[in-house]
């Protein structure tokens, strides 16, 4: 399994980039999973549905499955922040790539998605100069990057180029985590 993160400010284009990259990798025969950081009040279940009713009744976990998909819903008894490594461990290990959206402070190799702020907006600092885990930058204004860099810089809309680069450098993204130290 190979893992690459996508980090950047809200509205920078992370979700769109990940969404467009999935089929690019798929065309190369790669199975892709996604881990996304969400805000604490998100829900994938809805009132009135059986699974919602089971959760409301106090079930710790509800697994719902059909011949097309499986979903696991786990209720935490108190606020719990799972780390990105714990979430990756929940995935099928036979997947080729895991694209991680968010978790900008993680120790995963990441592509920073950076956009110049709109006129009148406060400047948005880039992380690539300080974060040793950022291995490339995707932007629509490379000429306005806040600091010079030797890292690869991709056009944010060049998903084929980003996908090709990931595949050519796949060994750099092989996921290994030391659970004992």
Image: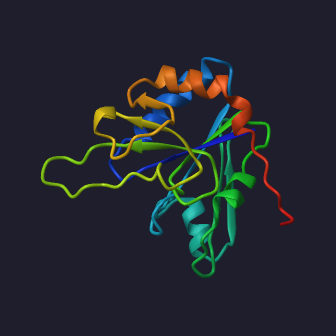
Residue at 74% x, 32% y: name it. 171
Q: Residue furthest right?
A: 180
Task: Residue 25: name its quadrant.
Answer: top right
Residue at 48% x, 69% y: name it. 40
Measured as percent of width and height from the top left, residue 154 is found at 44, 29
Q: Residue furthest top?
A: 27
Direction from residue 23 to residue 16 in the image, left or right: left
Direction from residue 151 to residue 125 in the image, left or right: left
46 and 157: which one is in front?
157
Residue 140 visible to the viewer:
no
| 3 vs 89: above or below | above
175 and 45: which one is in front?
175
| 20 vs 90: above or below | above
157 and 74: which one is in front?
157
Residue 48 visible to the viewer:
yes
Measured as percent of width and height from the top left, residue 114 is found at 37, 44
Measured as percent of width and height from the top left, residue 97 is found at 67, 36
Task: Residue 1: name its quadrant.
Answer: top right
Q: Residue furthest left?
A: 120
The quarter of the rendered structure image containing the C terminus is bottom right
Task: Residue 23: name its quadrant.
Answer: top right
Measured as percent of width and height from the top left, residue 145 is found at 33, 41
């Amino acid at each position: 399994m190979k893992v690459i993160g996508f980090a950047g400010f809200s509205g920078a284009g992370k979700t769109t980039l990940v969404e467009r990259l999935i089929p690019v990798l798929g065309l190369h025969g790669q199975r892709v999973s996604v881990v996304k950081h969400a805000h604490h009040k998100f829900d994938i279940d809805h009132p009135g549905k059986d699974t919602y009713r089971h959760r409301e009744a106090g079930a710790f976990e509800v697994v719902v499955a059909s011949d097309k998909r499986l979903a696991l819903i786990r209720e935490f008894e108190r606020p719990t922040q799972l780390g990105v490594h714990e979430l990756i461990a929940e995935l099928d290990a036979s997947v080729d790539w895991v694209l991680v959206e968010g978790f900008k402070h993680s120790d995963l190799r990441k592509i920073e998605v950076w956009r110049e702020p709109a006129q009148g907006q406060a400047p948005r600092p880039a992380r690539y100069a300080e974060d040793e885990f950022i291995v490339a930058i995707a932007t629509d204004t490379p000429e306005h990057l806040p600091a010079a860099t030797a890292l690869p810089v991709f056009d944010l809309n060049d998903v084929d180029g980003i996908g090709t680069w990931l595949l050519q450098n796949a060994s750099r993204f092989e996921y290994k985590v030391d659970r004992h130290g």
